[in-house]
Amino acid sequence: MNRLLTLCTLLFPLALRAQTPSAYNLTVHVVGSSIGEECAGHACEHSQNLRVTIDGQKYELQSDTLLAKGVIALGDYPGRLITDEHKPTKEFTREYTLQFPDGSTRNFQVIGVTE
């Protein structure tokens, strides 16, 4: 009886975790990656620029950084939508969070959209 109770105690949290939907419910397919830099005087700003496909739509994403962090490898990353605002003019602003293999995350703003 103790073995059954121990087994149930160990498996119950795993069953709950399997039913909980992932906060990162989108697949962000990175097809292009580059580092951007803008300098004004002695100050420079860096960005990570990605060309991605999310749910069949092609976007250009950008994340501003203080330091150049490197080129992101091509491939699929878990992602989630953070903000999605639409205006009557059909303009929109949208931001996604990407999760990397080490568990770290980074926010990216949509700066372009293509067919």
Image: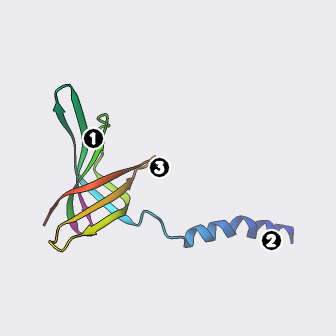
Question: In 3D space, how far apart are the residues under numbered discs 2 and 1 (Cα atoms)?
Answer: 50 Å
In the rendered structure, are the residues bearing label 3 and label 1 in contact, judged by CB atoms less than 8 Å apart? no
| Residue 114 in the image, given as x and y percentages of width and height | 13, 63
Give, as a single range, the part of the protein colored magenta. Answer: 51-57
Above or below for 67 versus 114: above
Lateral position of residue 31 relative to residue 101, left or right: left
Q: Nearer the viewer, mark 2 or mark 1?
A: 1
Q: Main secondary structure of the magenta part?
A: strand
For badge 2, the amino acid type reads Leu
| Residue 41 in the image, given as x and y percentages of width and height | 16, 27
For badge 3, the amino acid type reads Gly
Label whose residue precedes the other's in the sequence (3 or 1): 1
* Picture residue at 49% right of the left edge, 70% below the top: 21
Whether residue 52 is in magenta: the answer is yes
Label whose residue precedes the other's in the sequence (2 or 1): 2
Residue pointed to by mark 3: 103
Residue pointed to by mark 1: 71
For badge 1, the amino acid type reads Val
Residue pointed to by mark 2: 4
